Amino acid sequence: MSGKSDELLLIAAIARLITDPLGHPVRHAAVGAASPIPAAACWLAKMQGADIRLSLLHRPRGNPFTEGTRELFDLAGQGRIDLFFLGGVQIDGEANINLIGTGDWPGTAVRFPGSFGSAFMYLTVHRTILFREEHSPRVLVPRVDHISAPGTSPPGTFRRGHAQALVTGRCVFRFDPARARFALATLHPGETREGVRAATGFDYDELGEIAVTEGPTEAQSALLAGPVCDAMIETYPDFCRRVWGRGMKETGAKEQAA
Amino acid sequence: MDVDALAALVPDGAQLALVPDNSLSPGAFARALVRRGARGLRLVGVPVSGYATDLLIGAGCVAEIETSAVTLGEAGMAPRFTAALAAGKLRVTDATCPAMHTRLQAAEKGVPFMPLRGVLGSDLVAHRPDWKIIDNPYQAGDPILLLPALSPEFAAFHAAMADEEGNVWVGRRRELATLAHASQRSLVTVERTVRGNMLEDERLAPGVIAGVYVSATAVVEHGAWPIGLLDEYGYDADHVALYAKLARSDDGFAEYCARFVNAQVARAAE
């Protein structure tokens, strides 16, 4: 999927996960480089009234920290980051993620960028939303070639949280850390159970009726096109132009990742 | 001292810590190292690596690297890093970001190691014989990772200002202070020099790295480019995208160096 309605659907789906009353309450969410979609979802949740402090690591100006990402990791180490987002070039059915590569260590077949802070953040933040738009057997594999960060940990190993869900371009999976297993939660419009099964390399549960992922309500759409876009336009000008048709004169503030 | 003289202070084979593309990475200094023909460098990504590292690898300056990731951000994978690894020309030691910070924090304190939460269960641990897991001596049954202190032989970054006392100003990027505190020698390019002593100005002092930690400075205007510098100039995404495109091939990389690395020698000589 690549259309703007699909991006709005993903934003709405992630915002719903953030404000899920059953999850660890989110008072402080940090968003890294990965994608503007999680950032938009956090802004949406906040502008709907959720009491969330957002630390956006890649704002070109007004970076939230005065000690760079070191401060982010120190905050997470103390348990002061409630929600973080991780991706994975490979993600397996036990929610292990691989950002290193395929083939022999350290990625002799295909090398990915590297693990970044995932090995730490996945265990120290209270909950993680896994987000990867590409939903294919090449990404969602039975077993990752290398574990950058483990989906679960044995009893006795310090760990504050796990993946709450995996959001892809086709569906939302919920994760049960006790069973180390995903279950299909909702299908995006136009997707079928069979289609998702065929596109997923790992096994997962399908319990009862599977609802369709709901897109943004009218009120959410208005928030997204207005104040959410306003908040994001300096950091993600290309994204805002594409999704909301909103332009900003070039200021050198390009989308940037590290 | 100019940037080429600064780069000449780094001998072949030296261990050199570099910062990522959102943290005052010294673009001009990396190009000067390429011009000098540095060889056998052992790079350290604090905590990840970007344009400067990929450029140095492409130019054959690097023997090994320890880092948590190598990336050109929105411009994608770092092509010369990927090619060198595939060709077996680069020894890569993988880490995770907070481990790099923690190792420097240990060095800053002068202690031999420091613990870090998380990481257990990552395959990184099995590939890092220098990382140890112990049982928490204060609470049995709580395994925890220990990391050895890291005191890089050299660190390099680009700051906005240097003053007459040799202090440099990095604004809110105070993680660079930890890097400078931990490193044996810090080489800093700066946009400009200012008179007096910045530590006497309460508003500037929090962003100052004291001269005691700075071995040498060189003035280079736009010295971070194509990386941005605080609120002074932005990240040049178009240039990094051009680099990423050219660096996909050996010929393209050579063209990049001819246009943007070696050309600066002529400009400096004018």
Image (cartoon, rainbow, N blue to C red):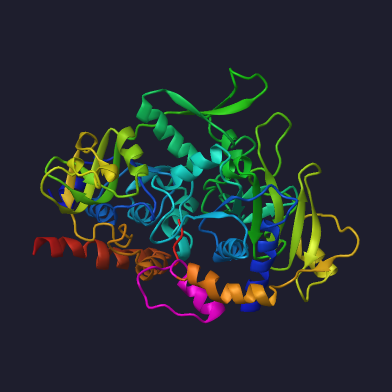
Q: Is residue A252 magenta?
A: yes
User: The C terminus of chain B is located in which quarter?
Assistant: bottom left
Q: Is residue A97 above or below residue B231?
A: above
> Is A213 on the left-hand or right-hand side of A221?
right
> Is A206 on the left-hand or right-hand side of B92?
right
The reply to whether residue B229 is in sight is: yes
Name the magenta segment's main secondary structure. Answer: loop
Between B197 and B58, which is closer to the camera in this rendering? B197
Q: Position of residue B210 (x, y in %)?
A: 23, 38
| Magenta segment boundaries in residue numbering | A234-254
The reply to whether residue A102 is in sight is: no
> Is B206 on the left-hand or right-hand side of A184?
left
Between B228 and A27, which is closer to the camera in this rendering? A27
Q: Residue furthest left?
A: B270
Between B113 and A78, which is closer to the camera in this rendering? A78
Q: Position of residue A8 (x, y in %)?
A: 64, 73
Q: Residue at x 41, y 47 (%)?
A: A68
Q: Residue at x 14, y 64 (%)?
A: B266
All told, the count of numbered labels is 0
> Is B38 on the left-hand or right-hand side of A81?
left
Q: Quadrant of residue B152?
A: top left
Q: Position of residue B244 (x, y in %)?
A: 41, 65
Q: Is residue A24 magenta?
A: no
Q: Quadrant of residue A1?
A: bottom right
Q: Residue furthest bottom?
A: A245
Q: Position of residue B187 (x, y in %)?
A: 23, 43
Q: Residue at x 43, y 46 (%)?
A: B90
